[in-house]
Image (cartoon, grey):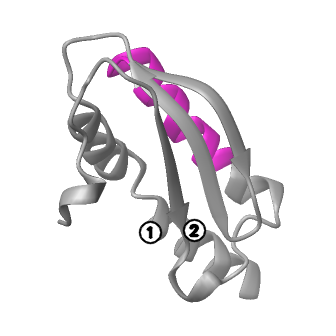
Amino acid sequence: MSEKYKIRDQERLYFVTFCVVQWFNVFTRPVYKDLLVESFKYCQENKGLNIFAWCIMTNHIHLIIGRNSENKIEDIFRDFKKYSLLARKLLQLSYQAMI
């Protein structure tokens, strides 16, 4: 990981962006956005994630985040990825829609 992308002060707010691979327009359907929001709610309720602002675009997400617990921000996002398994769920829903 590059030096400029590391969380250095856990008490500050950070602007983070997640991009979909190859900028594929995933978040055009409400069911996909709902999966993402559900995952963020889980991290807020169980991991101490604070979300101050967010914007879900069709192919990327912007967040202004902080924390309200002892968990490190990078650990919260690690757990977010584990909990959500968003890519798997999105692929399953896409496959079901094609059938």
Q: Position of residue 50 (x, y in %)?
A: 48, 20
Q: Are marks 1 and 2 in contact (CB under 8 Å)?
A: yes
Q: Is residue 36 magenta?
A: yes
Residue at the spot of label 1 = 88
Characterize the local packing of mark 1: few (<14), some (14-19) or many (20 or more) Cα atoms within 10 angstroms: few
Please provide the residue range marked out in magenta.
34-48
Q: Is residue 59 above or below residue 64?
A: below
Residue type at numbered disc 2:
Leu
Q: Residue furthest front?
A: 4
Mark 2 element type: helix
Q: Position of residue 35 (x, y in %)?
A: 61, 49
The foreground one among 94 and 3 is 3
Residue at the spot of label 2 = 90
Q: Quadrant of residue 60?
A: bottom right
**Quarter of the image that includes the C terminus:** bottom right
Label 1 to label 2, Cα distance in Å?
5 Å
**Quarter of the image that includes the N terminus:** bottom left
Q: Is residue 96 magenta?
A: no
Label count reads 2
